[in-house]
Image (tube, helix red, strand yellow):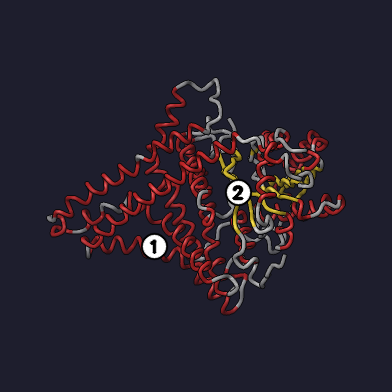
Amino acid sequence: MSYKLTPYFKVGRASDLQGKDRVLYRALEILPGFLSWTTLITAVLLSIFAPVTAAYFIIALDVYWLLKTAYLSLHLRHNWKRIRYNLSVNWSEMLSKMKYEHIFHLVILPYYKEDLAVVEQSIRSLLETEYDKKKMAVVLAVEERAGEKAIEIGKAIEGRYAKKFGHFLVTVHPADVPGEMAGKGSNISYAAEEARKKILDPSRIPYKDVIVSAFDVDTVAYEQYFLCLTWHFLTSADPYKVSFQPVPFYNNNIWQAPAISRVAAGSSTFWQMMQQERPEKLATFSSHSVSFQSLYEVGYWQKNMVSEDSRIFWNLFVARSGDYSVVPLSYPVSMDANLAPSLWQTMKNIYRQQRRWTWGVENIPYILFAFIKNKAIPFCTRLRVAFVQMEGFWSLATNPIMIFLLGWLPVILGGERFNKTILSYNLPVLTRNIMIVAMLGLVLSSVIFISFLPERPKERGKLAKLSMVLQWILIPFTIVVFGAIPGLDAQTRLMFGKYLGFWVTPKHRK
């Protein structure tokens, strides 16, 4: 396999470059925020100086939103059926006629200051999966800066479970390494290299036979996850040109989380489900899997940025000159929904988590810069990918604000002359009616959400399930406050060079 590694391949931000390249990259960092703010400011100015134009623009945007919602709802429904089917499949039987005993799974679980119970639940879920544990290696990747308690947790887990797997390794990622950002990317890259030196090479395990699953520490694997993953790996046309993406469910503590957290978590799941039906638009996110061979050849995950989970896909995409993609597994893994001791702290954590996720906008300058430099990537591929990524971050940061907050501006700011027109009278009515129709999709959302819930705990009353339905009326609030605003926040910070560091979502259990 021939990868094209360039001097800019592991660039994290403009300051990593020099001269004209630095200026160009900095301009590309400014671009997403500039487009979003220009859109919002233009909507306000048009409402004041050209309210008729603004009104027609808002109506067009509402119609676009309605059609897009209907389009995405179809994808959501299709993926719902696909996940239910995949959960019912006997993947062991699917593999029975294949040679798969050589496939080795390396699971990396990075953690910081999470409690023993969180780490142990994930380890136990691995033991409960239907795969030969002798063909599995588990790496607990702890941060040195987390302190002695975190290291002790790793040792305690190793003492209890190491003998149950083929290999078990606890790594301690050194603090304050020059050129590294403290975060998941630097930790799991260190862990992967340690696993190579201490597990794969001594055991003479071929890199091409190893599938790496980079899980968040709260990731709970479903029973047949590794069988499903192995089947997709073996049936891929070229498993070294693809990454594998499960669907993240946030079910670990879903019955304990407040409604606003459940809606935010469910919305993230639904978005990933819809993307699974559009693999050409899919990048790796959070917990994902990839061939060790591919990882090793590009130097593992980037150590100097926040969005290592998606950047590794773009690293591989650029290295392969566009000949790289994501295979959607349509099979779930489960993680924690945001939960803190108080509702206010939970809401703050949701916002910070969403801002970290939408900080994935830092991939935009990387992608565009690579497309300018790497002419081997087909022009149509560059054009399509650039548009899809730019439109995605632009619409995330602007559309909900314009639809739910700015849709009334022409009436408020348009002046007396505009307010005497029929258009002025009909604009709020038309906007409201279109939004009501669009919100009908929430019925499907509630049905899908409930269908994947774990069994209701005995201490939770029967009305708890009703709240799981009614919670979706919060969507207009969450899509703005925990979607558009943190997205705009991230783009604005990138625009002004106020780079985010890695923030670890606290894992709280009741």
Q: Residue at x 42, y 52 (%)?
A: 484
Q: Residue at x 78, y 55 (%)?
A: 207
Q: Quadrant of the N terminus?
A: bottom right
Asked which quadrant contains residue 169, the reply is top right
**Label 2 crowding class (10 Å Cα cut-off): few <14, some 14-19, many 20+?**
many
Q: Quadrant of the C terminus?
A: top right
Image: 340 above or below 456: below
Instruction: Residue at the far front: name it.
Output: 97
Residue underneath mark 1: 37
Q: Is residue 55 left or right of residue 439?
A: left
Residue 461 % position (x, y): 48, 21
Depth order, front residue of 175/384 = 384
- Name the kind of residue labelled 1 in the image: Trp
Residue 73 % position (x, y): 42, 44
Residue 265 % position (x, y): 50, 41
| Pointer 1 or 2: first along the chain | 1
Q: Residue at x 21, y 54 (%)?
A: 411
Residue underneath mark 2: 245
Instruction: Residue at the far bottom: name it.
Output: 20
Task: Look at the image and tell me whether residue 348 can be seen.
Answer: no
- Name the kind of residue labelled 2 in the image: Gln
Depth order, front residue of 57/115 = 57
Name the disc covering residue 288, or none.
Answer: none
Task: Look at the image and tell me whether residue 388 can be seen.
Answer: yes
